[in-house]
Image: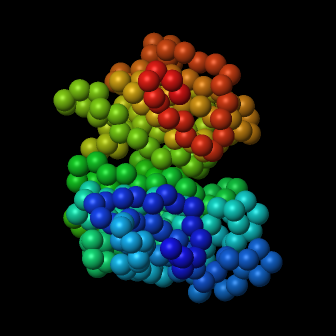
Amino acid sequence: TDLPGPGSSSPIVVGRRVFVTCWSGYGLNREEPGDQSQLRRHLICLDRDTGDIAWDETIEPYLPEDEYRGMFAEHGYASHTPVSDGRFVYAFFVKTSAVKFDMYGNQLWQQGVGTESGAMGWGTASSPILYENLLIVPATAESEALVALDTETGNEMWRQEASGFSGVWGTPILVPINDDRTDLVIAVPNEIWGFNPANGELVWYCKTMENRSFCSSVVAHDGVIYAVESGPGGGGGIAVKAGATGDVTDSHVLWSGRQRNRIGTPLYHNGRL
């Protein structure tokens, strides 16, 4: 099925629907990127059985947007995968906003989370996730923050800012610890951070491999966080037991080494990464 334009997000499947994002109108050619005022973000719903486009909703951009050049030309303006709770679908279009739609293409709210640019001008890629009544948005370049929005209203419920987010392109994950605790975990340059997803408070952190950026996401299995990364400044692999508090570098690291990986997120399967 032809889409209105390119995108780097992943599709998601919700029942008999497939959702994906893309962009059009600007930044389609390196030599002649065009006029930013024509840029449009698309949230598209396709029929899972036929591939037909059921609806295509467009969102006008916040301007100025990052220019289409260099690394960003390979990245684009629709790199964040949407997320759904089965009743609604949410998408993140960086400086423009996070948005909520129902299953029939009706926009229910739109909420900005920041309008800054990353130091390297590469755009962002971290995808939003859902936790209970919160949409947690990794506004890594837009405001160097994790931002939690109320799923019903779009209102901001909490914001955790830190300069370390500026070097992040991975997506946070939720790690169940016990019946009363879930950790929100994300890797940043040189460290892994664990937050309380209900209020955004930092619960624990662990020093990791030296790296000026972290492009992949961590993965978890049975309460253990695995991270593998390489790039400017170093790289390596590490396994950290979640569920503690404070600095867990000396107490909860199960192993670390010189494993290397760039951009792609590892998978855990049958005791192997």
| Image point (40%, 41%), residue name | 173
Q: Quadrant of residue 49?
A: bottom left
Residue 253's place in the image compared with 128, above or below, is: above
| Image point (48%, 47%), residue name | 171
**Does residue 171 appear in this view?**
yes
Residue nearest the viewer, comparing 221 with 121: 221
In the picture as drawn, the residue positioned furthest to the front comes out as 50
| Image point (63%, 57%), residue name | 118
Residue 169's place in the image compared with 231, above or below, is: below
Residue 71's place in the image compared with 59, above or below, is: above
Residue nearest the viewer, comparing 265 with 51: 51
**Residue 46: percent from the left, percent from the top?**
39, 72
In the picture as drawn, the residue positioned furthest to the right comes out as 31
Residue nearest the viewer, comparing 159 with 229: 229
| Image point (22%, 63%), residue name | 87
**Residue 163: percent from the left, percent from the top?**
56, 46
Residue 36's place in the image compared with 126, above or below, is: below
